[in-house]
């Protein structure tokens, strides 16, 4: 397997919003879902997940409530708010534009300049 | 919307600080235990699993501190801490304080006095109905 990629700064928030947009999750579930979707190619520091979640909740992009986990334990579930949905959309658009521009720059050949 | 939720979450945090601590504790514990269970399912011995889950999580206390920061509830607390620290430092080095405080007092006082004069003489319009003061701006414009 390839070495895991470290997350780019500022992208964790976007990935969390995306993971939750697919359905409410508890913190551990968010970690698993991101790892599953990324096929384990991203390294997410577990300790950094919760401060990010608290920040997102503080911003009003996600809300939380306690519920039952798969194995009947109490767990805190996060879901996306309407503001969070909009935020995810703008972040995703910005990210796509950004990668397009950067890829264009990196692909430039001497003849094109 | 976001400002409101920010204020609300801050107020909640201030009022229910102890409840939040308990919840945060429970949340992190759930994470570590769930991860340990997954490790056990993956073949790690039970005794080893909890230890490894905790280790791989990283600094739990640090994560908690960052969570508190994220909520903004540390602002008041750290302000109080800073003030206390400042007072202690001031009390410890009397000589330094004896020089620093009069220096600041005189400096601020002098700056205020000079600005008061400048404001009265230059910035405030003179009580003329027309504006003979344009001499100032013309001179500045030509320079």
Image (cartoon, coloured by chain):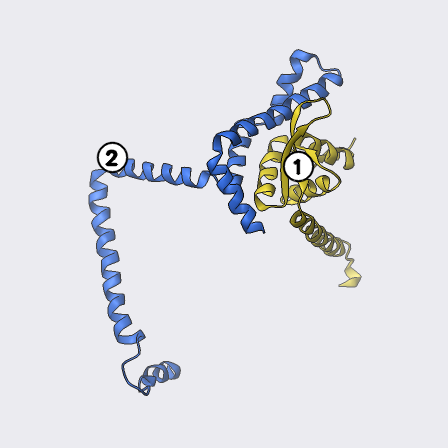
Chain colours: A yellow, B blue
Left or right, B122 with reference to A105 = left
Q: In the figure, residue A27 lies in which quadrant?
A: top right
**Disc 1: which chain?**
A
Q: Is residue A7 visible?
A: no
Q: Please tell me whether residue B65 is drawn above or below residue B121 in the rendered image.
A: above
Q: Residue at x 31, y 86 (%)?
A: B129
Counting labels gives 2
Is label 1 in a helix, a strand or a loop?
Answer: strand
Residue A87 placement (x, y as % from top left): 66, 50
The quadrant holding residue A79 is top right
What's the CA distance linking mark 1 and mark 2?
A: 49 Å
Q: Quadrant of the N terminus of chain A?
A: top right
A112 relative to B116 in the view: left or right: right
- Please tell me whether residue B93 is drawn above or below residue B40 in the rendered image: below
Callout 1–callout 2 Cβ contact below 8 Å: no
Check residue A86 in the rendering and tell me which mark sits there, or answer none: none
Where is residue B119? Give x, y as percent. Answer: 28, 71
Dot 2: chain letter: B
Between B39 and A6, the one lying in front of the other is B39
Q: Nearer the viewer, residue B14 or A99?
A: B14
Q: Secondary structure at mark 2?
A: helix
In this view, the mark in front (1 or 2): 1
Task: State the residue position of label 2.
Answer: B92
Residue B137, compared with residue A102, is above or below; it is: below
Mark number, residue A78: 1
Q: Residues within 10 Å of mark 2 (few under 14, many from 20)?
A: few
Quadrant into which the C terminus of chain A falls? bottom right
Residue at horizontal 78%, vertical 63%? A112
In-front residue for pair A8/A88? A88
Q: In the rendered view, does A104 fall on the left or right side of B17?
A: right
């Amino acid at each position: 397997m390839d070495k895991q990629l470290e997350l780019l700064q500022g992208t964790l928030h976007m990935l969390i919003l995306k993971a939750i947009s697919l359905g409410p999750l508890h913190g551990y579930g968010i970690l698993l879902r991101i790892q599953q979707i990324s096929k384990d190619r991203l390294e997410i520091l577990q300790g950094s997940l919760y401060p990010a979640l608290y920040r997102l909740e503080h911003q009003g992009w996600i809300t939380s409530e306690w519920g039952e986990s798969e194995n009947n334990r109490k767990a805190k579930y996060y879901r996306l708010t309407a503001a969070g949905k909009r935020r995810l959309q703008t972040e995703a658009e910005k990210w796509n534009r950004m990668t397009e521009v950067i890829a264009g720059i990196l692909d430039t050949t001497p003849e094109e300049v | 919307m976001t400002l409101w939720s920010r204020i609300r979450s801050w107020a909640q945090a201030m009022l229910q600080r102890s409840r939040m601590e308990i919840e945060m504790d429970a949340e992190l514990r759930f994470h570590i235990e769930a991860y340990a269970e997954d490790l056990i399912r993956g073949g790690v011995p039970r005794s080893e699993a909890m230890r490894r889950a905790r280790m791989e999580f990283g600094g739990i206390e640090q994560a908690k501190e960052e969570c508190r920061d994220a909520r903004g509830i540390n602002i008041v607390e750290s302000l109080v801490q800073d003030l206390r620290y400042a007072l202690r430092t001031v009390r410890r080095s009397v000589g330094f304080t004896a020089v620093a405080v009069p220096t600041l007092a005189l400096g601020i006082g002098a700056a205020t006095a000079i600005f008061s004069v400048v404001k009265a003489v230059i910035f405030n319009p003179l009580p003329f109905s027309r504006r003979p003061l344009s001499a100032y701006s013309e001179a500045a414009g030509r320079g």
